[in-house]
Image: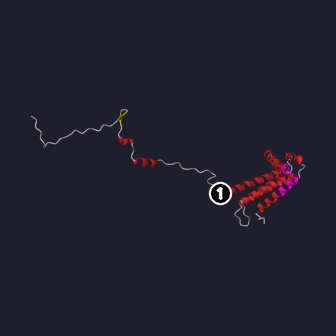
Amino acid sequence: HLCYNASMPITRKKKRTSSKKTGGKSTSTSSRNPTPARTSSRRKATRQPPVRESLLGSISPERKMDLVGIALALVGLLTLLSLFSVTASSLTGSWRSMLGLAFGWGVYILPFALIILGVWLVARDVERLPLLSLERIIGILLLFVSLLVILHAFSGPADAYMAAAQGGRGGGYLGAFILQALVKGLGFAGTIIILLAWLIIALTMTLDLSVP
């Protein structure tokens, strides 16, 4: 007969934890989900590529203004030399003829305006010179275009505006197009009034005058 002894401990067999097999390889739950410490170390290890600045982006705005002024003065000086040089190359000759068609007699005003504007930009910090503002630059452009239109009005009759521009006379094609549009839309009397008002506004903006 078997006797049961109450003092003897009852022992149970522990079941072994079986790891799941996937494709013949055992994978544990700890390998699936990486710890936060490992992910943070990986993020720190990835370095962002350095940001490369362009050549123009590394130049300060003040230096850019100086470069624009030097470029305008050089273009004006080269244009002036090409206009008054006795012997012209193919490049300077084509440049002179292109400017003559575009601006007519105003081609002799353009280089001086470019040189003055370029020197003004470079020497803008000089206290004796007046402040070169955006309003003054717009006024100079309006003054130049108004002079082209006025010059083209003296180039010949109204029906020969385009022929004069083709020959490089008056205000060139720019002056011819504007003058022809004004005459067709407003007539001669209205064109004269508009040109006078245009000239006064351009002079006011260029000289920075206040109209009472």
Q: How far across and how far down the image is residue 119, in percent?
A: 74, 59
Magenta span of residues = 183-196
Residue lying furthest left = 1
Seen at 40% across and 47% down, the residue is 38
Closer to the camera in the image, 163 or 202:
202
Residue lying furthest top = 24
Q: Quadrant of residue 166?
A: top right
Q: Main secondary structure of the magenta part?
A: helix
In this rendering, is residue 14 above or below 129? above
User: Which residue corresponds to mark 1?
Assistant: 61
Task: Locate the N terminus by quadrant.
Answer: top left
Q: Quadrant of residue 189?
A: bottom right
In the displayed structure, does residue 43 sit left or right of residue 183?
Answer: left
Q: How far across and how far down the image is residue 148, in percent?
A: 83, 53
Residue 167 is covered by the magenta coloring: no
Residue lying furthest right = 157
Residue 184 is covered by the magenta coloring: yes
Closer to the camera in the image, 9 or 127:
9
In the displayed structure, does residue 125 sit left or right of residue 100?
Answer: left
Q: How far across and how far down the image is residue 2, in percent?
A: 10, 35
Q: Is residue 171 visible?
A: no
Q: How far across and how far down the image is residue 104, in percent?
A: 84, 50
Q: Is residue 122 visible?
A: yes
Task: Locate the C terminus by quadrant.
Answer: bottom right
In the displayed structure, does residue 74 sit left or right of residue 32?
Answer: right
Closer to the camera in the image, 130 or 149:
149
Tell me the kind of residue under disc 1: Pro
